[in-house]
Amino acid sequence: MNAWTVPALVALGSYLLGSIPFGLILAHFGGAGDLRAIGSGNIGATNVLRTGRKGLAAATLALDAAKGAVAVLIAERVLPGLGPLAGVFAFYGHLFPVWLRFRGGKGIATYLGIALALFWPCGLTFAIVWLAASLLTRHSSIGGIGAALLTPVCAAYFFESALTLMFLAFGLTVLWTHRANIVRLFAGTEPRIGDR
């Protein structure tokens, strides 16, 4: 094989894995309807929760995180050092899935799974900040944005320069995917966790 063949295959496989819309699939087969016509129209766990199906929302969260982690772990098994490449393609595959005309989720759960698989202290930091901020404010968007932006700080603290840049790119992307949420937060119209 050429030197680029394995990285290219890992990138493609990670993108395809990341692009699986678990929230949409679970909501459909769980009888909750088409997520794109519910709440924010997003395919992530928070919008699944708005259907009132807590089990489906938890499963969506777990599977979206798992696909990020699995992409990283498989890549490292194939060729050590390719984990970050896999993480990038899984993350952006979740955001821009070819199956849904490149309109996917907002990346929080997948980011968590990638961070846990690449460097667990950063993944743990992400989970704690996300959970704490979400519970305190009852806004999943605040928890997700806060976690996404603090995770590169964690990587920098441990002198993980490559991960710092990667997580910073993820964090800025999360700000972009949450731009409508940010507007609603300032307007006081952002739905709280548990609202249907």
Image: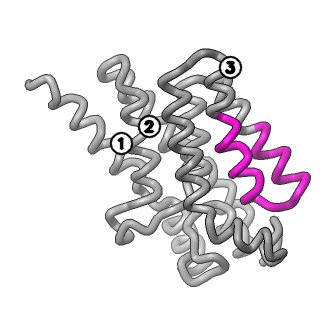
User: For mark 2, what is the residue?
Assistant: 87
Q: Main secondary structure of the magenta part?
A: helix
Going from the N terminus, do you reach mark 1 or mark 3 first? 1
Residue located at (62% from left, 81% from top): 38
Q: How is the image coloured?
A: one colour
Could you tell me how far apart the alpha carbons at marks 3 and 2 are, in whole angstroms? 20 Å
Looking at the image, residue 66 sits to the left or right of residue 72; the answer is: right
The residue type indicated by label 3 comes to Tyr
Q: Position of residue 124 (x, y in %)?
A: 71, 30
Between label 3 and label 2, give the one nearer the viewer: 3
Residue located at (62% from left, 62% from top): 178
Q: Position of residue 120 (x, y in %)?
A: 63, 24
Looking at the image, residue 88 sits to the left or right of residue 43; the answer is: left
The residue type indicated by label 2 comes to Gly
The residue type indicated by label 1 comes to Ser
SS at circle 2: helix
Between label 1 and label 2, give the one nearer the viewer: 2
Density class for disc 1 (Cα within 10 Å; few <14, some 14-19, many ≥20) is many
Q: Position of residue 18 (x, y in %)?
A: 42, 49
Looking at the image, residue 44 sits to the left or right of residue 165; the answer is: right
Looking at the image, residue 120 sits to the left or right of residue 114; the answer is: right
Q: Quadrant of residue 152?
A: top right
User: For mark 3, what is the residue?
Assistant: 157
The mark found on residue 14 in the picture is 1
Q: Work out which residue is located at the far left of the displayed protein and give it.
A: 1
Residue located at (64% from left, 60% from top): 45
**Is 106 rendered above or below residue 28?**
above
Q: Magenta segment, which residues?
A: 128-151
